């Protein structure tokens, strides 16, 4: 005979046991009169509980309660209506989109200010050129500085394109340093090769 | 306005809690109330008041206190309706409020009163029986109520929600804010005590004088 299941009966009687446990209890009850008698007593007790605790209220009690509550509710100031503008995920998506759009506009405006012509500056001296910073970002630089420098690397390309510039037009070369507040602008005037008196230093 | 008849409204509510859905009439009523239509609270009450009244009476064991608890429950429901999240089962949310109200009232009242004497006034259905049958029925009910009143508050609440309100163990656990294993333990203990109490009082004493 399988072990007695008396301690499992209070859960088994209302179907609170898992399938395997419940099957084990039922298998034992089929062969154990003592446990079966206990299970029947528990079943009768549960039935008496439901019979004794049936609601004593009738419809008139419910109507009286409803009237009393509604009278109090009508006497209270009306609650503010809740406006549902959008669901929470929709609001989050809209906020993220607005943030992204704002950052794009900001970058675009920043880019326009970089491209716009600043007031002409005198040609830099050799000392100024030697002070040109390393275009590679330092490991300790902030994220915004790195981004800015990546954008500014496009600018020196015009230095290599000076040969294609029309003769007589000054070439504009810009270097944006890692520090966004420091920009080196170099205006170079291409000299026709027929003038032998000019030196490379003068060209610059 | 709603198809539910009075008889249906007074149903014991043994069935499990309905899940909130787009077709849930309670959810639609809640939307109307939250939109400022306070009168929509009346049909909402009509659908839920029987269940709340019965629940409060089963937990508190006192008819007049249960009516007070039900009234306080509905007022709290109305005033805190803005905190209810649409989509979760409304009745479960309301039952949680009712249980809290009953706890507050039970704390103020103190220990449960001893149930009415076995030969007290006969209840409605017992009055239609013969005298002897009515007395037996009344005795049996009083025994059960006495046993229920003797249970610890947590066990009694778990037993009422699980066995009398027909909620699943997981639903009861969510409402009471405990783990399902705790509810299983509490209802098992309560069922055992209830059965032992009734068996002790109904079994004739042995070894007495002839």
Image (tube, rainbow, N blue to C red):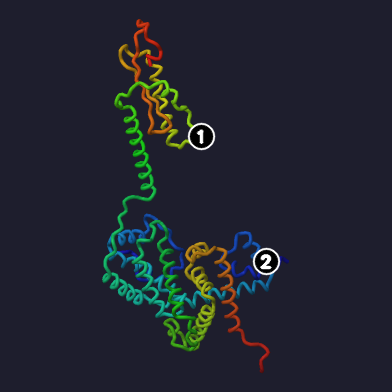
- Horizontal side of A56 relative to A11 (left or right) equals left
Quarter in which the C terminus of chain B is drawn: bottom right
**Distance in Å between CA atoms under marks 1 and 2:** 74 Å
Crowding at mark 1 (Cα within 10 Å: few <14, some 14-19, many 20+): few
Quarter where residue A68 is shown: bottom left
Of residue A198 and residue B101, the one placed in the foreground of this image is A198
- The x, y position of residue B137, in whole percent, is 50, 83
Which chain is indicated by disc 2?
A
Does residue B50 sit above or below A98 in this rendering? Answer: below
The residue positioned 36% from the left and 48% from the top of the image is: A91
Estimate the x, y position of residue A7 in percent, counting from the top left.
64, 70
Location of the N terminus of chain B (image quadrant): bottom left
Label 1: state its secondary structure.
loop
Q: Residues within 10 Å of mark 2 (few under 14, many from 20)?
A: some
Q: Indicate which label's residue lies in the foreground, 1 or 2.
A: 1
Whole-percent x, y for residue B183 in the image: 55, 67
* Residue drawn at x 40%, y 62% as measured from the top left: B90
Mark 1 = which residue?
A139
Q: Say if A98 sits above or below A24 in the image.
A: above
Task: Check disc 2 and report the residue beneath it.
Answer: A28
């Amino acid at each position: 005979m399988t072990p007695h299941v008396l301690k499992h009966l209070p859960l088994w009687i209302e179907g609170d046991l898992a399938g395997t446990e419940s099957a084990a209890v039922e298998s034992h009850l089929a062969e154990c009169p003592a446990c079966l008698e206990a299970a029947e007593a528990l079943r009768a007790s549960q039935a008496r509980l439901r019979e004794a605790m049936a609601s004593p209220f009738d419809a008139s009690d419910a109507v009286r309660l409803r009237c009393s509550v509604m009278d109090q509710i009508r006497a209270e100031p009306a609650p503010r209506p809740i406006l549902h503008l959008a669901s929470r995920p929709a609001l989050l998506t809209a906020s993220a989109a607005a943030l992204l759009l704002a950052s794009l506009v900001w970058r675009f405006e920043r880019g326009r200010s970089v491209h716009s012509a600043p007031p002409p500056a005198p040609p830099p001296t050799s000392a100024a050129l030697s002070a040109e910073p390393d275009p590679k970002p330092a490991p300790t630089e902030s994220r915004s500085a790195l981004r800015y420098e990546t954008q500014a690397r496009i600018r020196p390309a015009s230095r290599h394109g000076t040969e294609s510039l029309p003769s007589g037009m000054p070439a504009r070369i810009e270097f944006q340093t890692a520090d966004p507040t420091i920009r080196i602008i170099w205006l170079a005037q291409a000299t026709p090769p027929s003038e032998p008196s000019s030196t490379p230093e003068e060209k610059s | 306005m709603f198809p539910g008849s009075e008889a249906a409204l007074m149903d014991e509510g043994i069935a499990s809690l309905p899940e909130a859905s787009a077709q849930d009439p309670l959810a639609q009523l809640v939307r109307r109330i939250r939109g400022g239509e306070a009168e929509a609270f009346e049909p909402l009450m009509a659908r839920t008041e029987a269940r709340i009244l019965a629940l409060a009476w089963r937990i508190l064991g006192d008819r007049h206190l249960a009516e007070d608890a039900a009234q306080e429950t509905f007022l709290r429901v109305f005033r805190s309706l803005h905190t209810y999240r649409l989509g979760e089962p409304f009745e479960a949310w309301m039952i949680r409020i009712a249980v809290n109200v009953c706890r507050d009232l039970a704390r103020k009242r103190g220990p449960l009163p001893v149930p009415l004497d076995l030969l007290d006034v006969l209840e409605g259905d017992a009055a239609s029986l013969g005298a002897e049958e009515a007395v037996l029925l009344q005795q049996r009910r009083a025994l059960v109520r006495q046993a229920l009143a003797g249970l610890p508050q947590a066990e009694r609440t778990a037993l009422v929600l699980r066995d009398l309100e027909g909620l699943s163990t997981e639903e009861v656990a969510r409402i009471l804010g405990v783990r399902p294993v705790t509810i299983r333990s509490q209802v098992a203990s309560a069922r055992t005590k209830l059965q032992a109490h009734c068996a002790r009082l109904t079994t004739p004493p042995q070894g007495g004088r002839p």
